[in-house]
Image: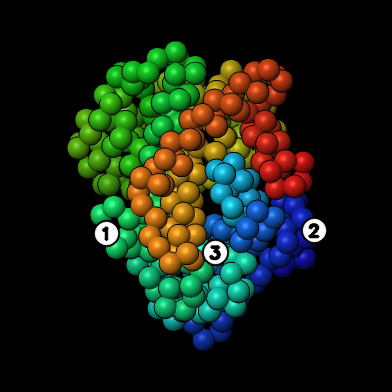
Amino acid sequence: MTAFWTEADFDDHEFVHVVRDRVSGLTAIIAVHSTHLGPGAGGTRFWHYPNPKDGLRDALRLSRGMSYKNAMAGLPMGGGKAVILADEARTKTPELLAAFGDAVEGLGGRYVTAEDVGMSEADMVTLSGRTSHVSGLPVSGEDSAGGDPGPFTSYGIYLGIKAAVKHRLGTDNMKGVHVAVQGTGSVGGGVARLLAKDGARLTLADIHADGVRALAEELGAQVVAPDAILTTKCDVLSPNALGAILDDESIARLDAQIVAGGANNQLARSNHGKALFDHGTLYAPDYVINAGGIISVATEYLAGREGRHASRDEVNALIEQIPARLESIWQASAADNVSPDVEADRMAQALIGRG
Ligand code: NAD
């Protein structure tokens, strides 16, 4: 692996820690972009990368995204992200998780972890046996915040989609508004369920054909093949699978008024925000709209450090600020004639002292 600071995605990250444990087979990358506002917080991704460089690239991009996300969510947290480089069979053993937990603990609280793709609440419990710098643990009471951040992320995205529909289509009523959801896992599935309650028209796609068909049946939604969802004619495209899906080719073929979803780093490259803007599509910057999970995780972690439990109301009140934040970005974008992602980055950079 070449020096990480020569990578195109390196952005003055404070540190990048490579963890190898021969006994358990663990290889992980922990990247902390900024601790300007507080400890670098962000989930751990468990994924098989045929080329480990792609794992490093994800850690660098995602940790910077977390700095921006946490700042824009109003949290006293910096940005970090960990990637566990899974083998092809995605073998996840207690020993491997224990070694990873030890590595997080060894950073002394400069990095705080939680769930991301491929990591569950149960995995967080395993990690908590080795480190106190973990969040997203099971809730102790119905009213307590915490646990799987997925539903909180879904709630924020749902509110953000409604804000985008109001901004672009001029209506508060989601009945019949056509939303195409890419990825119906923890986040996308939750978004689809919330939208279905409002009577939105849903088209769903996921590479897990059985799961998406069952959800579609439950919600009265349509299903299209994974390679057809990005070109589905709709009001809102909601990407909730993996990143880098908006590139020259997909934007040219996009037939949506709005792109608003939870996947991290949806823009393949930074110029694709302008490409979307020029295409006439309203974009909800991913790290602003998908902050619900980190708001829950951070609020749970910070309350725990004070020896108390945060309540769901406390978390939801913070998540309910997402629509206003998006609206201020869209207004600034229109006033300055720059794309919303650039406007959001400017706001975030000012907050983390890099403006
Ligand atoms: P998940 O693993 O539960 O769901 C992802 C889903 O996407 C899976 O069902 C998978 O089959 C599907 N998928 C993968 N490739 C696909 C493709 N090409 N086409 C269609 N479907 C595809 O993960 P999640 O927790 O729901 O996270 C989804 C996205 O949201 C990720 O980018 C994640 O980083 C981001 N995110 C998650 C959270 C959270 O709280 N879980 C918070 C912020 C951002």
Q: Quadrant of the C terminus?
A: top right
C-alpha span from label 2 to label 3: 26 Å
Amino acid type at circle 2 is Thr
Classed neighbour count for the residue bearing mark 2: other residues with Cα under 10 Å, few (<14), some (14–19), many (≥20): few
Q: Nearer the viewer, mark 1 or mark 2?
A: 1
Indicate the secondary structure of the residue bearing disc 3.
Answer: strand
Q: Nearer the viewer, mark 1 or mark 3?
A: 1
Amino acid type at circle 3 is Val
Vertical side of 131 occupied by 75: above or below: above
Say whether disc 1 or disc 2 marks the residue closer to the N-terminus.
2
Q: Nearer the viewer, mark 2 or mark 3?
A: 3
Q: Quadrant of the N terminus?
A: bottom right
Vertical side of 24 occupied by 177: above or below: above
Identify the residue at image location x=58%, y=69%. Answer: 109
Is 64 or 90 nearer to us in this picture? 64
Label 2 sits on residue = 6
Say whether disc 1 or disc 3 marks the residue closer to the N-terminus.
3
Label 1 sits on residue = 141
Indicate the secondary structure of the residue bearing disc 1.
Answer: loop
Question: Residue extending furthest top?
Answer: 170
On the rendered structure, is 170 left or right of 191? right
Classed neighbour count for the residue bearing mark 1: other residues with Cα under 10 Å, few (<14), some (14–19), many (≥20): few
Label 3 sits on residue = 112
Q: Are marks 2 and 3 in contact (CB under 8 Å)?
A: no
Amino acid type at circle 1 is Gly
Question: Residue extending furthest right?
Answer: 6
What is the x, y in percent for residue 184?
35, 43
Q: Are marks 1 and 3 in contact (CB under 8 Å)?
A: no
Say whether disc 2 or disc 3 marks the residue closer to the N-terminus.
2
What is the x, y in percent for residue 162?
41, 26
Identify the residue at image location x=71%, y=36%. Answer: 346
